[in-house]
Protein backbone atom coordinates (compact mmCIF):
# COMPACT_ATOMS: atom_id res chain seq x y z
CA UNK A 1 0.00 0.00 0.00
CA UNK A 2 1.39 3.43 -0.92
CA UNK A 3 1.91 6.26 1.59
CA UNK A 4 -1.12 8.01 0.12
CA UNK A 5 -3.34 4.93 0.39
CA UNK A 6 -2.29 4.22 3.95
CA UNK A 7 -2.82 7.84 4.98
CA UNK A 8 -6.19 7.91 3.26
CA UNK A 9 -7.24 4.62 4.82
CA UNK A 10 -6.96 6.28 8.23
CA UNK A 11 -9.57 8.88 7.23
CA UNK A 12 -13.04 7.78 8.33
CA UNK A 13 -15.52 8.03 5.47
CA UNK A 14 -18.71 7.34 7.41
CA UNK A 15 -19.96 4.82 4.86
CA UNK A 16 -19.29 6.99 1.83
CA UNK A 17 -16.67 9.11 0.19
CA UNK A 18 -16.70 12.49 1.91
CA UNK A 19 -15.17 15.76 0.78
CA UNK A 20 -12.94 15.68 3.87
CA UNK A 21 -11.56 12.25 2.99
CA UNK A 22 -10.99 13.24 -0.65
CA UNK A 23 -9.36 16.53 0.39
CA UNK A 24 -6.95 14.65 2.67
CA UNK A 25 -5.99 12.29 -0.18
CA UNK A 26 -5.32 15.25 -2.50
CA UNK A 27 -3.31 17.14 0.13
CA UNK A 28 -1.30 14.03 1.04
CA UNK A 29 -0.44 13.49 -2.63
CA UNK A 30 0.72 17.11 -2.82
CA UNK A 31 2.85 16.68 0.32
CA UNK A 32 4.48 13.60 -1.19
CA UNK A 33 5.04 15.37 -4.53
CA UNK A 34 6.87 18.11 -2.63
CA UNK A 35 9.38 15.58 -1.34
CA UNK A 36 10.72 15.27 -4.89
CA UNK A 37 10.57 19.00 -5.68
CA UNK A 38 13.16 21.68 -5.01
CA UNK A 39 12.34 24.26 -2.37
CA UNK A 40 11.55 27.01 -4.88
CA UNK A 41 9.08 24.83 -6.79
CA UNK A 42 7.06 23.40 -3.91
CA UNK A 43 3.30 23.07 -4.25
CA UNK A 44 1.14 24.93 -1.78
CA UNK A 45 -0.53 22.38 0.47
CA UNK A 46 -3.81 23.87 1.65
CA UNK A 47 -7.50 23.47 0.90
CA UNK A 48 -7.51 26.64 -1.24
CA UNK A 49 -4.15 26.05 -2.97
CA UNK A 50 -3.83 26.12 -6.75
CA UNK A 51 -2.92 22.82 -8.40
CA UNK A 52 -2.42 23.63 -12.08
CA UNK A 53 -2.28 26.92 -13.92
CA UNK A 54 -0.58 30.28 -13.71
CA UNK A 55 -0.42 30.27 -9.89
CA UNK A 56 1.17 26.81 -9.62
CA UNK A 57 4.72 25.58 -10.25
CA UNK A 58 3.30 22.29 -11.60
CA UNK A 59 3.85 21.52 -15.29
CA UNK A 60 1.72 19.08 -17.30
CA UNK A 61 3.98 16.10 -16.58
CA UNK A 62 3.90 16.92 -12.87
CA UNK A 63 0.10 17.16 -13.04
CA UNK A 64 -0.14 13.68 -14.58
CA UNK A 65 2.11 12.22 -11.88
CA UNK A 66 0.10 13.96 -9.15
CA UNK A 67 -3.20 12.72 -10.60
CA UNK A 68 -1.92 9.13 -10.67
CA UNK A 69 -0.92 9.42 -7.00
CA UNK A 70 -4.32 10.89 -6.14
CA UNK A 71 -6.12 8.07 -7.99
CA UNK A 72 -4.06 5.55 -6.01
CA UNK A 73 -4.96 7.25 -2.75
CA UNK A 74 -8.63 7.42 -3.71
CA UNK A 75 -8.70 3.68 -4.30
CA UNK A 76 -7.47 3.36 -0.71
CA UNK A 77 -10.71 4.96 0.50
CA UNK A 78 -12.92 2.99 -1.85
CA UNK A 79 -13.24 5.62 -4.57
CA UNK A 80 -12.36 4.45 -8.08
CA UNK A 81 -12.27 7.65 -10.16
CA UNK A 82 -10.15 8.21 -13.27
CA UNK A 83 -8.90 11.80 -13.31
CA UNK A 84 -7.09 11.86 -16.65
CA UNK A 85 -10.07 10.90 -18.78
CA UNK A 86 -11.74 12.95 -21.50
CA UNK A 87 -14.58 13.99 -19.22
CA UNK A 88 -12.19 15.68 -16.79
CA UNK A 89 -10.01 17.17 -19.52
CA UNK A 90 -12.92 18.61 -21.50
CA UNK A 91 -14.52 20.56 -18.64
CA UNK A 92 -15.14 24.23 -19.46
CA UNK A 93 -13.53 25.13 -16.11
CA UNK A 94 -10.67 22.79 -15.33
CA UNK A 95 -11.20 20.68 -12.23
CA UNK A 96 -7.41 20.81 -11.77
CA UNK A 97 -7.20 24.56 -11.09
CA UNK A 98 -7.33 24.22 -7.28
CA UNK A 99 -7.59 21.72 -4.46
CA UNK A 100 -11.24 22.63 -3.86
CA UNK A 101 -12.23 22.38 -7.53
CA UNK A 102 -10.60 18.94 -7.74
CA UNK A 103 -12.25 17.76 -4.51
CA UNK A 104 -15.63 18.94 -5.83
CA UNK A 105 -15.04 17.17 -9.15
CA UNK A 106 -13.97 13.90 -7.48
CA UNK A 107 -16.85 13.77 -5.02
CA UNK A 108 -19.33 14.58 -7.79
CA UNK A 109 -17.86 11.83 -9.99
CA UNK A 110 -17.88 9.33 -7.13
CA UNK A 111 -21.56 9.98 -6.45
CA UNK A 112 -22.43 9.41 -10.10
Image: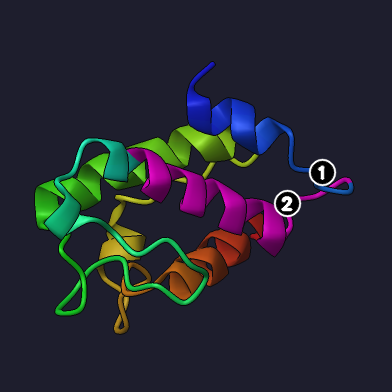
Quadrant where the C terminus sits is bottom right
Specify how the rendered protein is coloured.
rainbow
Expressed as whole percent of the image width and height from the top left, the position of residue 50 reads 33, 73
The residue singled out by tag 2 in the image is 17
Mark 1 or 2, nearer chain start: 1
Residue 4 vs residue 29: left or right?
A: right
- Report helix, strand or loop for mark 1: loop
Residue 45 occupies quadrant:
bottom left
Residue at horizontal 17%, vertical 48%? 62
Q: Outermost residue, top direction?
A: 1
Residue 32 vs residue 1: left or right?
A: left
- Report helix, strand or loop for mark 2: loop
Q: Nearer the viewer, mark 1 or mark 2?
A: 1
Q: Outermost residue, front direction?
A: 39
Q: Residues within 10 Å of mark 2 (few under 14, many from 20)?
A: some
Residue at horizontal 34%, vertical 46%? 67
**Residue 75 visible to an observer of this rendering:** yes
Residue 22 occupies quadrant:
bottom right
Tell me where the magenta segment starts and ends, as one range. 15-32
Quadrant where the N terminus sits is top right
Q: In the rendering, which numbered label is found on residue 12?
A: 1
- Between the residue at mark 1 and the residue at mark 2, the CA separation in whole angstroms equals 9 Å
Amino acid sequence: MSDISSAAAAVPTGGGVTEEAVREVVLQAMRLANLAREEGSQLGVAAEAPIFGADSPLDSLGLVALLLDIEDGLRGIGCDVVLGDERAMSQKRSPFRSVQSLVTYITGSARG
